[in-house]
Image: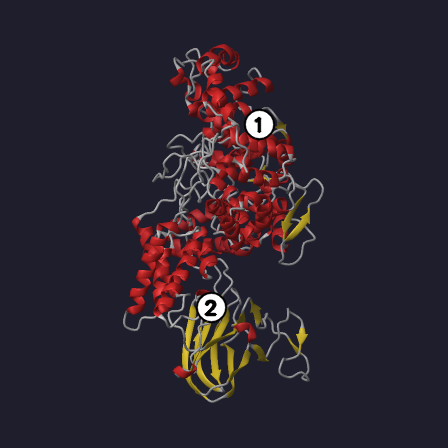
């Protein structure tokens, strides 16, 4: 329970606060300090950055919350005053902060303001997870719903989770699709059984799965002499989850047996996928025949070329007698052996057998008891009671709180009308009512109610049902589970918060929190789509002027229509093509899908390790370990890691790796498609690590490549180019903050690999921060951030996590709560458990302001995307 101030003390507070006005305090205690440190730039007629600190004429003009919040952040982080000016002592910073919080913001730590109220819609991830928990169906919201907007860095921000007419239609379609795919409409149906691909065993295979040069025996002739492997790899059938992969290149037959107890009409459905390993600019022209037999009779004989990722569902009617029936699938490679570029495969997902079709042998649907735990009563009155029980239970979970009786009655009336129609059933009526529930605003939005105000409280606590939802959507991105619902119903959740938070963080569902928070805070999920051109990156580290000149000539001649080319142009084109093509085809490091996945896992596993082991959050900046598999370790140049499995790896002494800043996710998503971007990387550190973002860039800034001619740029380092780019005073102030941070990461190319040279120039990583600290390389910078700027980092971590937990941007009213969280975090040696429990016990998480809900249509303001 949150501590409540005594009522008598609350009555006395206004008297104490009114003894001296904020303007009086400013004139007597704060103005002299500002005159000493600030007025040379922000007073006496000066207004750098649009900030003036000596023009307050009355209380109203003094209480400019936006201005003073900026002052508070800049002085705390020691961005202001500038390092070359007079230095603010810590006691002076604390005095200024106290004035801002108490006199300007009028915050009372004894009666904290929980902040503004926003109406929160389920975002795509939350909707998908909630539907999975509620109905057991995995609905693909990434494909079916438009992308959610983001506000303050997160897509669970209530300010941007609007509901457009198109999205409303999507929700209606989704409700119908989810219920139709899961809830039985009949009490009895044709029996069906899925024989998973992994149940099929290899009957015959001409060449076993061996590497080049190995020898082995054929699988259907154990006594045969060894045969040499072919000149290329022929993979054996391999289990992939519940499916079985069969290679285009390996002659093989797999089969299984299905036993029929009752003779009659049956249906056999073959479910296949064509799959491949994608390789840029490499094509695979292999073909194969797929032959499916039932009891030795061929029912499918089809040729497959490279089919992309198509799905095939093929159905065959059979009349079966009782007994065993054989099902087999054969792969026959066609034509001469061709180069294997993409590892073409046929994935046997399953074979579904339905029948017998005679109604006497129909059965209860497999998932019937999940939705209808008791048999439907024959008596109409008993059936009506059962219907309302079902709807009350379903709406309790879907709306995440008990439902009022009038709503239950409206849903029951709808269900009874559907059931009374021709061919209608009780089950169909319940299903239609479920559709209405899933399309309801009470499901799509998170509805909250509060407890009655008690004496001394300025703002009420949210009730236990709302608290359960706040907890589950924070830590699981999904609805509460049975334990949270039980405690909420008993009114004991708030009293058991510590145990419940620990239980929830130990549950695998907390992986959603790790994935979603790191995916947005560190932009880790963007690694799956970031575009990096391997050729451009390769050429920056291996300059080839002849190739670049030839490529320009090639492009110029290629624009001439073939019929208009002269003999000389044709000869020149042929010669240049012979020079250009080998460079294009030469092996180059690139971001393969598997490498991107490993990079994302590295970031997620690093955060999960710190979180679940309750280690210092500072390790996310400067750790002596990371998480790698063989492919990622080779990409980083780290030896001794083998296999596909990701695991914790102790880094070599003095390794530049360790911490999120040197992970492939961050390095790639903060690069341009053709090169690194010190500006983007610097902005990333300012925003994501230090919480001190630079101002948005002015409009119409030219690209970095346009600051000088191509010839001049070829002779300049990137640092020199950036200096040209930031010549104006307007640009210089921000670049002085961003560029040193970004340039410290220049030893890592756009793919995240280490390099010492860039465009034939040595990489210069040394620099000096705007706050005065000098560093030689990324190792020293990480140490400075983890020690000298530890306070900024922990404050930013608290702000990011509180923003994510509340689903709204923070305002000046949240300053006290945020400061208290940082104090708790520092006292706990930066352990994340202190921050999590502190957020969940805070007034912002536990209480609700009595203001009317605010739901804005536009995205929250934030720093613009840097262009350099």
- Identify the residue at horizontal 59%, vertical 50% (top origin): 503
Q: Which residue is mark 2?
A: 369
- Horizontal side of residue 228 vs 668, given as left or right: right
- Among the 4 quarters of the image, the one containing residue 426: bottom left
Q: Residue furthest bottom?
A: 321
Q: Residue 699: give x, y in percent of width and height.
A: 37, 31
- Identify the residue at horizontal 45%, vertical 71% (top origin): 305
Q: Residue furthest left?
A: 422
Q: Residue 275: give x, y in percent of width and height.
A: 48, 66
Mark number displayed over residue 769: 1
State whether residue 753 appears in this view. no
Q: Name which of mark 2 and mark 1 comes first in the sequence.
A: 2
Mark number displayed over residue 331: none
- Identify the residue at horizontal 64%, vertical 32% (top origin): 827
Circle 1 SS class: loop
State whether residue 347 appears in this view. yes
Label 1 Cα crowd, 10 Å radius (few <14 / some 14-19 / many 20+): some
């Amino acid at each position: 329970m949150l501590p409540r101030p005594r009522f008598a003390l609350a009555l006395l507070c206004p008297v104490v606060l009114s003894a001296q006005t904020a303007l009086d305090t400013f004139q007597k205690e704060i103005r002299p300090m500002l005159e000493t440190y600030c007025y040379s730039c922000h007073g006496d007629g000066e207004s750098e950055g649009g900030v003036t600190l000596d023009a307050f004429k009355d209380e109203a003009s003094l209480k400019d919350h936006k201005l003073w919040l900026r002052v508070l952040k800049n002085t705390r982080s020691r961005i202001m005053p500038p390092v070359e000016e007079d230095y603010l002592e810590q006691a002076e910073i604390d005095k200024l902060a106290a004035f801002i919080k108490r006199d300007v913001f009028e915050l009372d730590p004894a009666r904290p303001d929980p902040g503004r109220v926003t109406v929160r819609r389920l975002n795509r991830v939350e909707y998908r997870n909630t539907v999975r928990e509620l109905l057991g169906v995995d609905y693909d919201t990434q494909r079916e719903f438009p992308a959610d907007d983001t506000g303050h860095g997160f897509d669970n921000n209530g300010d941007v989770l609007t509901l457009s007419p198109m999205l409303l239609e999507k929700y209606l379609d989704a409700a119908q699709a989810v219920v139709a795919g899961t809830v039985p409409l009949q009490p009895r149906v044709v029996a069906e059984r899925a024989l998973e691909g992994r149940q099929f065993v290899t009957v015959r295979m001409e060449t076993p799965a061996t590497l080049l040069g190995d020898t082995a025996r054929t699988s259907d002739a154990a006594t045969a002499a060894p045969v040499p492997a072919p000149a290329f790899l022929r993979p054996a059938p391999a289990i992939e989850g519940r499916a079985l992969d069969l290679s285009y290149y390996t002659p093989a037959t797999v089969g299984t047996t299905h036993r029929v107890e009752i003779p009659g009409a049956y249906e056999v459905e073959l479910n296949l996928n064509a799959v491949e390993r994608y390789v840029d600019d490499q094509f695979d022209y292999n073909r194969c025949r797929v032959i499916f037999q039932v009891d030795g009779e061929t029912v499918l004989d089809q040729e497959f070329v490279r089919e992309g990722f198509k799905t095939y569902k093929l159905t065959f009617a059979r009349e079966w007698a009782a007994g065993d029936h054989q099902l087999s699938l054969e792969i026959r490679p066609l034509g001469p052996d061709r180069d294997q570029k993409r590892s073409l495969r046929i994935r046997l997902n399953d074979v579904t057998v339905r029948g017998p079709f005679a109604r006497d042998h129909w059965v209860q649907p497999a998932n019937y008891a999940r939705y209808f735990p008791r048999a439907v009563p024959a008596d109409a009155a008993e059936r009506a009671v059962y219907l309302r029980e079902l709807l009350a239970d379903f709406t309790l979970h879907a709306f995440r709180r008990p439902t009022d009786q009038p709503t239950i009655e409206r849903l029951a009336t709808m269900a009874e009308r559907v059931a009374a129609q021709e061919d209608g059933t009780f089950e169909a009526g319940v299903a239609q009512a479920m559709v209405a529930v899933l399309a309801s605003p009470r499901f799509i939005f998170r509805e909250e109610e509060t407890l009655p105000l008690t004496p001394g409280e300025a703002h009420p606590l949210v009730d236990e049902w709302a608290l359960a939802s706040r907890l589950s959507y924070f830590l699981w991105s999904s609805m509460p589970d049975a334990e949270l619902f039980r405690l909420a119903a008993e009114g004991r959740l708030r009293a058991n918060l510590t145990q419940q938070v620990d239980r929830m963080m130990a549950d695998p569902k907390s992986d959603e929190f790790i994935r979603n928070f790191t995916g947005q805070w560190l932009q880790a999920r963007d690694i799956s789509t970031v575009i990096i051109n391997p050729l451009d990156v390769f050429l920056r580290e291996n300059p080839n002027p002849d190739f670049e000149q030839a490529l320009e000539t090639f492009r110029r001649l290629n624009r001439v229509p073939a019929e208009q080319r002269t003999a000389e142009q044709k000869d020149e084109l042929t010669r240049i093509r012979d020079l250009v093509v080998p460079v294009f085809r030469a092996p180059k490091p690139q971001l393969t899908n598997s490498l991107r996945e490993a990079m994302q896992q590295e970031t997620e596993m690093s955060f999960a390790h710190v979180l679940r082991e309750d280690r210092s959050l500072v390790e996310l900046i400067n750790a002596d370990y990371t998480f790698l598999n063989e492919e990622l370790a080779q990409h980083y140049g780290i030896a001794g890691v083998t296999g596909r499995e990701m695991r914790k790896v102790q880094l070599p002494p003095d390794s530049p790796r360790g911490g999120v800043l040197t992970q492939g996710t961050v390095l790639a998503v903060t690069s341009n498609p053709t090169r690194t971007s010190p500006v983007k990387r610097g902005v990333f550190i300012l925003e994501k690590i230090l919480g001190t973002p630079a101002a948005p860039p002015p409009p119409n800034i030219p690209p970095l490549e346009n600051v000088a001619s191509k010839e001049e740029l070829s002779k300049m380092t990137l640092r020199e180019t950036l200096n040209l780019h930031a010549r104006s005073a307007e640009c210089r102030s921000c670049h002085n903050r961003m560029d040193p941070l970004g340039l410290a990461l220049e030893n890592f190319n756009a793919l995240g690999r280490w390099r010492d040279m860039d465009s034939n120039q040595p990489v210069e990583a040394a620099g000096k921060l705007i706050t005065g600290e000098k560093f030689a390389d990324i190792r020293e910078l990480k140490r400075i951030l983890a020690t000298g700027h530890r306070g900024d980092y922990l404050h930013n971590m608290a702000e990011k996590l509180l923003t994510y937990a509340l689903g709204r941007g923070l305002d000046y009213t949240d300053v006290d709560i945020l400061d208290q969280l940082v104090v708790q975090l520092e006292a706990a040696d930066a352990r994340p458990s202190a921050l999590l429990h502190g957020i969940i016990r805070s007034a912002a998480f536990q209480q609700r302001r009595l203001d009317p809900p605010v739901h804005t249509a536009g995205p929250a303001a934030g720093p613009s995307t840097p262009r350099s």
